[in-house]
Image: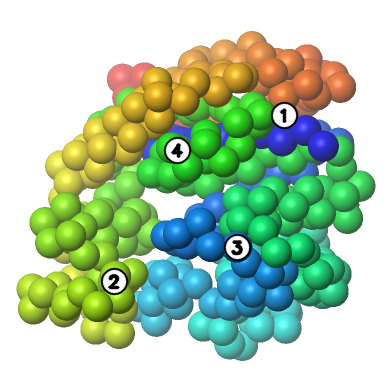
Amino acid sequence: MDRSIIISNGRCGSTLLSDLIVDEPETCSAQEFFTAVAPWPRSTVQLTGAEYWSTLSSPKLELAVLLRLGVPPKEVRYPADGRWAHDLAALPRILAVTLPKLTDDPDALYAQLADRVPHFPRQSTAAHHQDFLDLCAMLLGRHRWVERSGGSTQWAASLLADYPSAKVVYLTRNWPDTARSMSQHSSFQLVQMRMEAQARYGVDPFDPIPGRVVPAELEPYLPDRLTLEMLRERGDVHRYVGLCAFLSSQAEQAISDNPPRHLLRMQYEDLLADPVRELTALGEFLDFADPAGWAATVAPRVGRPARTAVAAAN
């Protein structure tokens, strides 16, 4: 099984890459899986397959809060006629984005996984993640997977350490445009709020360390108290330039400390300027059967953002 991971700060074209990779017939394009399963266990405790499945089949707290506030991220693709469509707060985390991006019948794939994953052996979380993605690819008849989660640079050190043989694509975009896009996205507003809380108080209001008291200043940001107005207050673009700087430093430090065996750096601006060239290089790096043919087929779907296009016209 070939395994690859796209890391990025988010809001830099990584979703576009994943959606284009879907059209490569031998590849399982797994989207937002590592985001769905975070936070990972803080220790090296071994989990049984049943314990691991209990997490995968549980709701994601962050998504439940954004649903309560009426601002779910547009990446959520669960079908309107699905089993959990009328109770999205209880939606299993892998059904929000990951499985609907793999198949038109995510509930059926979920049922197949529910029969198999609980029988995984007792092992580390990282090993469970790899076995889960391997299984998804196998069930779909693919012989490789490429995982992509927006904002995965925050876990770069763990990803590089846990999957040393994986091919790594590091996608970047200029910080001003990335920050502007982040500031308008509910998930990244939540990420910025949580990271700022950790930096100031050493506590994540969405994942407090057992036994540590949440400071009074953070109590309004607890999941059951957070309001839409408070979330929208995170809209200052300058906050997200700082977030970009932090996330980028995490990725660069991880790559320096633990260089991947196979690394491809890509820039969103280069992808816009010459999509066929950049996508062909990506396909070659990922060992696609026909990199140039795939690139030529999907390149027309790479469009310049409206703001950039207007600026260029002027």
Q: Residue furthest left?
A: 217
* Residue 2: quarter of image: top right
Residue 91 in the figure: left or right of residue 60: right
Residue 98 in the figure: left or right of residue 134: left
Residue at horizontal 71%, vertical 44%?
A: 29
* Residue 234: quarter of image: bottom left
Which residue position holds label 2? Answer: 208
Tell me the amino acid under the disc marked 1.
Val
Q: Nearer the viewer, residue 190 or 211?
A: 211
Q: Residues within 10 Å of mark 3 (few under 14, many from 20)?
A: some
Q: Earlier in the sequence, mark 4 or mark 3?
A: 3
Which residue position holds label 1? Answer: 298
Q: Earlier in the sequence, mark 2 or mark 1?
A: 2
Residue 3, how many percent across, how many down?
Answer: 71, 35
Q: Earlier in the sequence, mark 1 or mark 3?
A: 3
Residue 313, how many percent across, how many down?
Answer: 37, 20
Which residue position holds label 3? Answer: 46
Which residue position holds label 4? Answer: 156
Residue 269, how many percent across, how many down?
Answer: 44, 20
Tell me the amino acid under the disc marked 4.
Ala
In the structure shown, which secondary structural element does the residue marked by tag 1 occupy?
helix
